[in-house]
Image: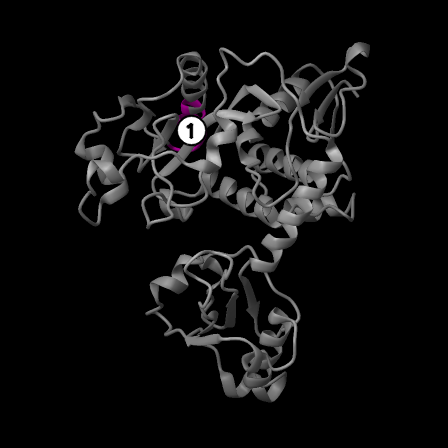
Amino acid sequence: MTHVVNCAADYSADYHKEKGVKYLSLHLKDHVRENIECSFYDVIDFMESAKKEGGRVFVHCVQGISRSTTMCLCYMIFTQKVSLDDGLKFIRERRQIANPNMTFMAQLIWFHKRLYATSIDSVPVSPRVFLVSSHQPEDPYRISCRMLMENMYQGEKSKLLDPRCVFLVQGPSTCPLYIWQGANVLEGNLGPYMDASNHHAKLLQQHEKANQEIVVIQQGKEDDRFWNLFFSGGEKPPTSSLYGSVAEWDRLIIDLATINHVMAAPVVTQMQDYKILVDEEKKMKPRLFTYPDWNESSTVFDFEDLLEDTYLILCVRANHSEPGHEHDAHQAYIWKGGDFDEEEASNEVISVEDFKKKVLEQYWGCKNPEEQFNIQVINELFGNESDEFNDYF
């Protein structure tokens, strides 16, 4: 091996660097809050360089299950245009335990659509917004452009443009590609942030159908064309509601001019913290059940799963730990495609009523959950689905 992609630099050192092995070391965490796609192009470039040099690349994390598999898949999607299913099948034929976590799977699905779908609406966020910041506190000088996985300005808890940051904003191909600069970007950060922004903008133009015009715009000097990307269907809110610090990003906004050392948390502590986060996220994750498989579900799905000959139940657990939501009802959305024959299906496999009963028991982990929990069963109308239902897709 001549090159190594180390996806777990918190855990594993670059042991063979002194022997001339070239490393790309990434401090990636294997949990559902990790944005791994911001490193896809770095990995692809590193692996392509190794290939041109006639080298061989070893990709590893800790167990060779999630992070390293995700990076191999992103390379295959980019260079061979394989689907996620075909790529994962190819890898599992060689390593059976390969299994990216559910958020990594979603980011791979989105990456494929970003590269090959014809419409910017292929992923359920518009516009596509990329936060420019340090990749990790343990690796502050690596500046990443991470795509936000949710729309901004969608309610009280939505993220806003943070004055401490730089953002890339990609709208339809007819609209310029914006680099937005916050008013409070640290002086020592602006140069590295802009270098990373311009580099990533070129990648978006080359591979993701972004407009060839790049417009740099400062906070407070945005025009209507910029704001229409966020508020095309309604009136723009007052200026006081347009900008705000996002606490989630505090750890990524590091003063590059004054930092003099990086101290990583002990690996054991990190792994314990992440396990708690992962367990909680798995518990709260909405799950989609497809008739007749009541004991199997998916946590990664989109509108392509709404096939006309299917019967689906989407189970959503209320988050009672959030202030003001202590008494919210859990929800079970029932969706039936226009070509699904309920009577025929019930006679051949399992009745729809039994399927519904077993799904609720499977998701909430007990017998007769409707007697123990406040579960709201919502019947969706085919072709006229509620906004709340559509938002999950």
- Left or right, 167 with reference to 315: left
| Residue found 62% across the figure and 24% down from its top | 138
Q: State which quarter of the image contains the C terminus.
A: bottom left
- Is the residue 100 above or below the residue 40 in the image? below
| Residue found 49% across the figure and 44% down from its top | 110
The answer to which of 356 and 137 lies nearer the viewer is 137
Residue 100 image-quadrant placement? top right
Residue 236 image-quadrant placement? top left
- Residue span colored magenta: 201-209
| Residue found 53% across the figure and 31% down from its top | 38
- Left or right, 275 with reference to 156: right
Q: State which quarter of the image contains the N terminus.
A: top right
The answer to which of 144 and 113 lies nearer the viewer is 144
* Magenta stretch secondary structure, dominant: helix
Q: Is residue 126 visible?
A: yes
| Residue found 38% across the figure and 25% down from its top | 164
Q: Amino acid at mark 1?
A: Leu
- Is the residue 20 above or below the residue 272 in the image? above
- Is the residue 176 above or below the residue 353 in the image? above
Q: x%, y% of residue 64?
A: 76, 39
Q: x%, y% of residue 91?
A: 72, 43
Q: Is disc 1 placed on a helix, strand or loop?
A: helix
Q: Which residue is mark 1?
A: 204
The answer to which of 161 and 338 lies nearer the viewer is 161
Q: Is residue 358 magenta?
A: no
Q: x%, y% of residue 180?
A: 32, 26
Mark 1, Cα crowd under 10 Å, few <14 / some 14-19 / many 20+, is some
Q: Is residue 83 visible?
A: no
